[in-house]
Image: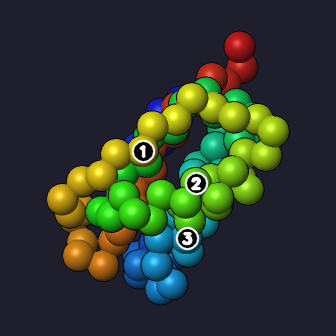
Amino acid sequence: MFVSGTTGTRDGVVVEGGAAEQTRQALENIVAALARVDATVADVVRTRVYVTDIEQWQDVGRVHGEFFGEHRPASAMVEVAKLIDPAMVVEIEADAVVGA
């Protein structure tokens, strides 16, 4: 399963609070997408995190770690010039292997 272009939005609105809160919401959105196919974060094998300010890597990485716990998927974090909405500072993609 590929979950792409997931941002820190709730009900179509970008959450406030910066990179950590947007990361948390994006990952909650990914968890919800996984649940629709009876998958969990334990099924995630790779994430790609796009940030508009790489200086926020520790906050983003901390929240990412909270979601995955001891299960550590392969991951990359890349700084990008901007995302589709100027209020967005984090976008996450996740690849999961389901039913293997």
Question: How many C-alpha atoms fall within 10 Å of the one at disc 1: few (<14), some, or many (≥20)?
Answer: some
Q: Please give left or right for residue 48 compared with residue 84 in the image.
A: right
Circle count:
3
**In this view of the protein, which residue sits in the foreground, 70 or 40?**
70
| Amino acid of disc 1 | Met
| Amino acid of disc 3 | Ala
**In this view of the protein, which residue sits in the foreground, 70 or 8?**
70
Q: Position of residue 26 (x, y in %)?
A: 52, 61
Distance between the Cα atoms at labels 1 and 2? 9 Å
Rendering quarter of residue 74: top right
Q: Position of residue 27 (x, y in %)?
A: 59, 57
**In this view of the protein, which residue sits in the foreground, 80 or 87?**
80
Residue 28 in sight: no
Assign the C terminus to one quadrant of the image: top right
Distance between the Cα atoms at labels 2 and 3? 9 Å
Give the mark, 2 or 3, whose residue is nearer the N terminus.
3
Residue drawn at x 55%, y 70% as measured from the top left = 20
Rendering quarter of residue 88: bottom left
Which mark is drawn over residue 99?
none
Residue labelled with disc 3: 20
Give the mark, 1 or 3, whose residue is nearer the N terminus.
3
Residue labelled with disc 1: 77
**In this view of the protein, which residue sits in the foreground, 36 or 39?**
39
Residue labelled with disc 2: 61
Task: Name the residue furthest top.
Answer: 100
Residue drawn at x 42%, y 44% as measured from the top left = 77
Residue at disc 3, secondary structure: helix
Q: Please, is residue 65 above or below residue 89 in the view?
A: above
Q: Please give left or right for residue 11 compared with residue 54 in the image.
A: right
Residue 81 in sight: yes
